[in-house]
Structure formats: C-alpha cells, structure tokens
Image (tube, helix red, strand yellow):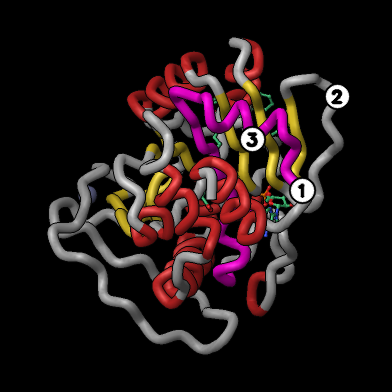
Amino acid sequence: MIPDSLICALRSARHVVVFTGAGVSAESGIPTFRDALSGLWERFDPSELATPEAFRRDPALVWGWYEWRRMQVLKARPNPAHVAIAELAHHVPRLTLITQNVDDLHERAGSQGVIHLHGNLHRPRCFACAREPAEPLPVAEEPEGGRRLEPPRCSHCGGQLRPGVVWFGESLPVDALNAAFQAAGECDLLLSVGTSGVVYPAAEVPHRARDAGATVVHVNPQGEPTAGNREYLIALPAGEALPELLRAASGA
Ligand code: BJW
Ligand code: ZN
C-alpha cells in the first residue's frame, strides 16, 4: 500500500513535519469543519459562524455552538491516527506537529509541543479586554444538538467571553505561524493529514515544504491525485494510514 520510495524517504528523513486538519479527528467522532451541521445549527454554514461579525451579531448563537463542540471534544478520545503520530515522534530524529485543529486530541494521545495555528477551544478569553478567566469554565450537559447560550462575563471588565480560536479575518498567533513556516521550510518530509487545504495562511505550510524540496504526503480519502515525483496521496482514512506509516517508519 505504501510505495517503497516513500518508505525509503520516511526512514531517511531527519526532520518530519506532521500537519493536521479536521479529518484527523473525524474518526474520534468530531465532525470536520466542512461537514453539514446538525441540530439547531443546520441552517448555518460554519464559515458564517466562525467570524467576529457573527459573534457581535448574535453572541449566544456562536457561544452555544462552540460550547456544543467543546462538549463533543471532551467526550471524544484520541483515535489510532493521533496515537500513531505521537508514537512516530519516537521513531524519527525530529518531528514537528502542526495542527489547525482547536481540539486537544493530539496532546491527549501523548504528543508534545503541538503548534496550534487556529487556537484552542478550551481557552476562552474576553472579547473586550482579551484576558483569560482565572478558573476553567464548567461543562454544561447539553441536549443532543446543543442550544443557544449567553456567553459568561469577564471577571475583570464585565465583557463577554469568546472562544479562544482564530476566526476568519483574524490574525494567526505570530509565534505559532513563524514556527510552522520555519519547520516546513527545513523538513525533509511533510505528512499533511485530513485537511481540505483551503484556509490560508495555514494551507501554505505544505506548499512551503514542497517548494523547499521536501517529500509531501497527503492522507485524505477524498484527496486529489498528485502529480509531482516527491508528492504522494494515501487515499485512506487517517486512522488506517497513520498506523501503516508508523509501521513503515519503525521497520516493523
Ligand atoms: C479525512 C477523514 C479521515 C475526512 N481521515 N481525512 C489567501 C487567499 C484567499 C483567502 C485568504 C488568504 N489569506 C487569508 C484569507 C482569508 C481567510 C481564508 O483562508 N479564506 C478561505 C476560506 C478563502 N483566512 C483568514 O481569514 C485567516 N486570517 C488571516 O488570514 O489573517 C490575516 C488577515 C486579517 C485581516 C484581513 C485579511 C487577512 C484566519 C483563518 C482562520 C480559520 N479558522 C477556522 C475556524 C477555527 C475555529 C473553529 O474551529 O471554529 O479554522 S476555519 C476552519 O477551517 C478551521 C479549520 O482549522 C480550517 C481548516 O479546515 P480543515 O481542517 O482543512 O477541515 P475541512 O473540514 O475543510 O477538511 C477536512 C478534510 O478531512 C476533508 O478534505 C476530508 O476529505 C478529510 N477527511 N475524514 C483523513 N477519516
Ligand atoms: Zn474583559
């Protein structure tokens, strides 16, 4: 299933970058960003909810959606793809993990130093003064499909709390983006796992690796066939492909 030339590239790589999107968490039961929504939110397009304008217009709608998603993540467990990525770090000289995901499933699988380009669902901050609450937020048990929820208030200024994620039109965290671009420019091999590659500037990460001469491997059951001689598509779910790649890297 994995071409010999790719096994060779993986075994000789000194620096591997793994770049993940929503597809890596799909087999943990977390819907991808571009899946149709269900319940109260089925009338909405996620790209219309993930904006500062949507939050200003209807904070309870947006906060309710994110709390529903936070609950899904809290109930979810890392899947074999997250576990294989964490394990892969022990079989290559250097591994940098960059994710667009706002869940913590990579960390819970054992990965360390994960670069989060689009923030973290579990770290809300004040929409007005940007301070984070001192105490973690309680988790409300929600009916299937979630509901509208008024955001809690900031204990410093009384402003509304917002999810600690990067919305459309907002800048990515500078340190995370710089670290991601640097790793992409330096690596020998990049695995791009479960992303549609349409959201910038994150989508530049695999392009930068390819332009710097690295081997690029896309893991996506719906991926486009690749043309370059150092570019591969593994058209399988991440939970099957990553354990297979780990076996190839470890020589098992
Ligand atoms: C499986 C699988 C399985 C299924 N195994 N695979 C340059 C060109 C054009 C536009 C822009 C540009 N630069 C900036 C922009 C604007 C905008 C943008 O990119 N728009 C495009 C959509 C056109 N970018 C921004 O606004 C960014 N900010 C910015 O550029 O700031 C500078 C600036 C400021 C002011 C003015 C102008 C510029 C910010 C982008 C922030 C994105 N945030 C989100 C939401 C985060 C919070 C949340 O989760 O709600 O991040 S959007 C959403 O998309 C989320 C994701 O991280 C991101 C990427 O999605 P991803 O992960 O690829 O998921 P999907 O669902 O798209 O794909 C899943 C894939 O998995 C599919 O392919 C499946 O086939 C596959 N799959 N099951 C493996 N089992
Ligand atoms: Zn505040």
183 displayed left or right of 134:
right
Q: Between label 2 and label 1, give the one nearer the viewer.
A: 1
Mark 3 or mark 2: whose residue is earlier in sequence: 3
Q: Residues within 10 Å of mark 2 (few under 14, many from 20)?
A: few
Where are the magenta residues, as a range?
Answer: 1-29
Does 77 appear in magenta?
no
- Amino acid, disc 2: Ala
**Label 2 – label 1 distance at C-alpha:** 18 Å
Residue at x 62%, y 29% (from the top left corner) = 8
Residue at mark 1: 1
Res. 51 visible in picture: no
Q: Secondary structure at mark 3?
A: helix
| Residue 116 lies in quadrant | top left
Q: Secondary structure at mark 1?
A: loop
Residue at mark 3: 7
Residue at mark 2: 227
Q: Is mark 2 within 8 Å of ligand 1?
A: no
Mark 1 or mark 3: whose residue is earlier in sequence: 1
**Label 3 – label 2 distance at C-alpha:** 18 Å
